[in-house]
Amino acid sequence: MLKRKATIDDIPALIKLRKKQLTDEGLPPEPIFDIDRQLTDYFISALTDGTFVSWVMEVDGEVIATSGVCFYTLPPNFSNLTGGVAYITNMYTKDEYRKRGIAKELLKMVLDEAKSRGYSVARLHASSFGKSVYEKAGFTESEGYMSLRL
């Protein structure tokens, strides 16, 4: 398995796995909407400007797992003086590769990215598939999110 940072060339794989993640989580596709265009535009923009970073895992040249972190800023508060938030998203591993520690490894990569950029808070919304991975990494329920102090 090869672990690496995603590039613009990975956008088709990011889209494919994002859509699979959404349907696995119970969000049926809307037949009147073509989300591919919106996802392509998002990934091109966010990967280019650095507001989204993704690490992927490959097997024989095929992306089998993704991770992602979006960087944004809220007004500062008493527990987060910069207001910076690293929002973990797009975490998905194909069924046949689950339970091998891949999500744990990719989560570590996006958290390291957030720390290296000086972010002190990571947040996410967990599906039932991934909640135990995040709990083991130290995330706790807080204000409608799972959160971790970095």
Image (cartoon, grey):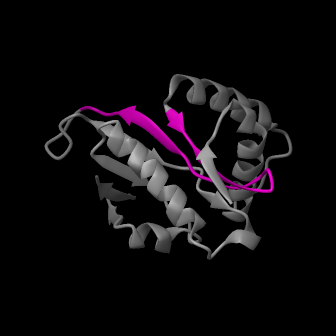
Q: Main secondary structure of the magenta part?
A: strand
Assess whether residue 21 is covered by the magenta stretch: no
Compared with 119, 92 (above or below) is below
Compared with 71, 137 (above or below) is below
As rendered, which of 37 and 70 lies closer to the eye?
70
Q: How many marks?
A: 0
Which quadrant of the structure image shows residue 31?
top right
Q: Which residue is drawn at 66% across and 34% down?
A: 7
Q: What percent of the width, then of the height, locates residue 34?
A: 82, 37
For the view shown, which residue lies furthest in the right direction?
31
Which quadrant of the structure image shows residue 116?
top left
As rendered, which of 32 and 5 lies closer to the eye?
5
For the view shown, which residue lies furthest in the left direction?
78
Q: What percent of the width, then of the height, locates residue 30?
A: 80, 47
Q: Is residue 113 left or right of residue 94?
A: left
Compared with 141, 62 (above or below) is above
Q: Residue at x 39, y 52 (%)?
A: 123
Q: In this view, does 93 lie to the left or right of 77?
A: right
Q: What percent of the width, then of the height, locates residue 75?
A: 26, 32
Q: Residue at x 29, y 38 (%)?
A: 118
Q: What percent of the width, then of the height, locates residue 24?
A: 71, 64
Q: Can residue 143 be seen in this view?
A: no
Q: Residue at x 27, y 45 (%)?
A: 120
Q: Give the range drawn in magenta.
A: 52-75
Position of the N terminus by quadrant: bottom right
